[in-house]
Image (cartoon, rainbow, N blue to C red):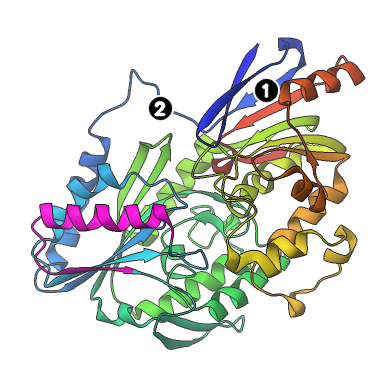
Amino acid sequence: MKVPLHVGEGVIKLAIPNENLAGILQPKKRNPDSIDSDILARTVHGGQTGLTEQVPGRSVGVLLPDGTRDLPLGDIFPLLLPLLKDARKVLFFLCTGSHNSQTSANSLIISTTQAQAGMAGIMEYAVISHDCQKADFYEAGVTRQGTAVLYNSRLDEVDVFVALSDVKHHYFAGYSNPIKNIVPGLCEFKTIEQNHSLTFDGRSRAGVHPWHPNASRRNNPLANDQLEAMLLVVRGRPVWALTIISQSGGVQWADFGLAEVASSCAFQQADDWNSHTVKPVEHMIVSPGGLPNDVDLYIAQRALELTTSVVRDGGRVLFLAGCPNGIGSELTREHFENKLTIPPEAILRQTRKEYHLFEHKPYRFAKLIQRLDRLWMYTQIAPSVVRKIHAEPCTNPQALVGSWLSDKPDAKILVVDGANKLLLTRSI
């Protein structure tokens, strides 16, 4: 069987005999015969009443994911922005968190936002690209976990917030969700670092969040800290959210309303569609799903974190990640790229007290490397660099699959495409 997998801007097809396939998993798509082409329009207009009552004469802050996300703004803006034309002003925040704010993808979002705001008749607006190092910050207080909450000062100009969020499982924050647009999205480096140190707590994991509809799945220390910090920032001001679940640039599901309600519904839908319990396997092929989900290893790694727990100790993984921008940005070099090159056992001796921002990623990468027989990478990253981070470069994925089957003719291979939007757990 020819199995297509997305890598960078392209698709490769791997021939795997049917008898050797443990399964092919992808983010769920709505049945094309049942797709309502107006799903987004009906969602926005159905939930607009409360928002439009709060907009006239007030300042509205629209919170946008940055260019590392694949939110379809071209579909959303023509529906959402006309609802804001009676605002006194609209501030569009590009919620970059610790990511590089100066990228071509972010520039495209800014130009798109400017064009769409004008077309929607919004008379006064500004687009603010957040920089966690250089923005002006105000302090909101300190959370119970000890996170000092420093946020972009321009948030104080906002009366009503509207967050746009493509919801999917997140390997330590539970889910990508509207809270993350503010914390870490619009916070200072120190705040992000202190919050992310909670990744060393094993309860900070995918599928668990304080807004989850299931009360037994709300104890996530890192996500709890993000929520507490966000509440300190917004200080009772209303936060609305358009939550969507997308696939291949198209909206598959949407909800619009107050952030907690819209998020809770989105978490349940993400669980229903994109959470799988599978039997343990010895061989696995993982693709984040192509750009922008594999723009660099820093972004692409989440696909491994969300799926490879189902691989047995001593198993083998082929990671298909284009990574045209390499390991990560200059900002992450010291505590991500450089840290990846030291022996895994040294990385794993680190504690939360010693944490620097980004070091949760090499820590988790080292845990995976130590557990596997080998991690192969089919990528644009130079082979010498791949070896330095304790992985094995792969130039011919089909030949590698052939070698696996030559070693073990009855091997079962689990194939995952779009892994950045899936959560796999191992069956007992």
Residue under label 2, please give it.
30
Identify the mark nearer the N-term, 1 or 2. Answer: 1
Please tell me whether residue 254 is drawn above or below residue 192 in the rendered image: above
* Residue occupying the point 17% across, 68% down: 125
Magenta-drawn stretch, dominant element (helix, strand or loop) = helix
Extent of the magenta region = 103-128
Judge by depth and name the residue closer to the eye, 344 or 246: 344
User: In the rendered view of the protein, which quadrant contains the C terminus?
Assistant: top right
Residue under label 1, please give it.
23
Q: Position of residue 348 (x, y in %)?
A: 84, 64
Judge by depth and name the residue closer to the eye, 418 or 136: 136
Q: Position of residue 179 (x, y in %)?
A: 44, 64
Is residue 127 rendered magenta in the image? yes
**Marks 1 and 2, Cα distance to the nearest angstrom?**
20 Å
Q: Is residue 3 left or right of residue 386?
A: left
Q: Is residue 150 left or right of residue 367?
A: left
Amino acid type, callout 2: Arg
Q: Position of residue 283 (x, y in %)?
A: 79, 29
- Count neighbours of disc 2 (C-alpha within 10 A) and say few if under 14, some if 14 to 19, many if 20 or more: some
